[in-house]
């Protein structure tokens, strides 16, 4: 399943832990607070649980009430229609030949 994981977290320590967890699951950073990749349904559920645990970790006392993590699944057809603007020449997926770069 293609997905984007986007987060808005104020505390550096928690934000870094979320980024590390996304990388551990094989997601690639596409922007500072956005990761993309392809995971099985089981791995998506595992990622969700791991990220929930980070947000609820009592040791991390810097969780803000506005901190949020979005896991956005995308169908293959929607993902293929992505449009990339700017200087980045690739997107972390297996359909690079279908990428539109402006």
Image: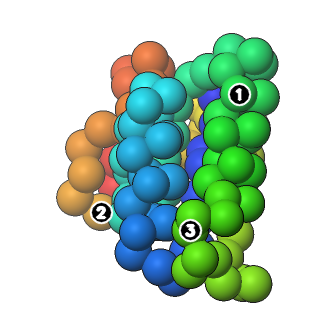
Q: Say whether disc 1 or disc 2 marks the residue closer to the N-terminus.
A: 1
Circle 3 SS class: loop
Q: Residue at x 48, y 41 (%)?
A: 21
* Residue at which label 3 appears: 60
Q: Nearer the viewer, mark 1 or mark 2?
A: 1
Residue located at (22% from left, 58% from top)? 87
Q: Position of residue 79 (x, y in %)?
A: 63, 35
Residue at numbered disc 1: 46
- Is residue 96 positioned above or below 31 on the image? above
Instruction: Assign the N terminus to one quadrant of the image.
Output: top right
Instruction: Name the foreground residue: 8 vs 99.
Output: 8
Q: At 66% from the left edge and 59% from the top edge, which residue is drawn?
A: 57
Q: Is residue 102 left or right of residue 44?
A: left
Q: Secondary structure at mark 1?
A: helix
Query: Closer to the camera, 62 or 6?
Result: 62
Gap between marks 3 and 1, in whole Å? 20 Å
Q: Check if mark 3's residue and mark 1's residue have beta carbons within 8 Å.
A: no
Q: Quadrant of residue 24?
A: top left
Q: Residue furthest front?
A: 59
Residue 35 is situated, as x and y percent measured from the top left of the image, at 48, 47
Q: Locate residue 95 relative to residue 79 in the image: left or right.
A: left
Instruction: Tell me the SS state at disc 2.
Output: loop
Q: Is residue 99 above or below residue 43?
A: below
Q: Spatial distance from mark 3 to mark 2, Cα to Cα?
A: 36 Å
Q: Do the residues bearing badges 1 and 2 touch, measured as CB atoms within 8 Å?
A: no
10 Å crowding of disc 1: few (<14), some (14-19), many (20+): few
Label number found at residue 86: 2
Image spot of residue 95 (x, y percent): 46, 20
Sequence-wise, the earlier of marks 3 and 2 is 3
Question: In the rendered image, which quarter is residue 66 located in?
Answer: bottom right
């Amino acid at each position: 399943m293609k997905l984007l994981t986007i987060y808005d977290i104020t505390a550096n320590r928690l934000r870094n832990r979320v980024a590390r967890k996304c990388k551990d699951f094989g997601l690639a950073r596409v922007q500072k607070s956005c990761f993309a990749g392809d995971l099985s349904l089981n791995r998506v559920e595992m990622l969700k649980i791991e990220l929930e645990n980070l947000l609820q970790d009592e040791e991390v006392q810097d969780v803000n009430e506005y901190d949020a993590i979005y896991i956005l699944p995308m169908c293959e057809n929607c993902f293929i229609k992505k449009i990339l603007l700017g200087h980045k020449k690739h997107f972390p997926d297996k359909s690079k030949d279908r990428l539109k770069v402006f």
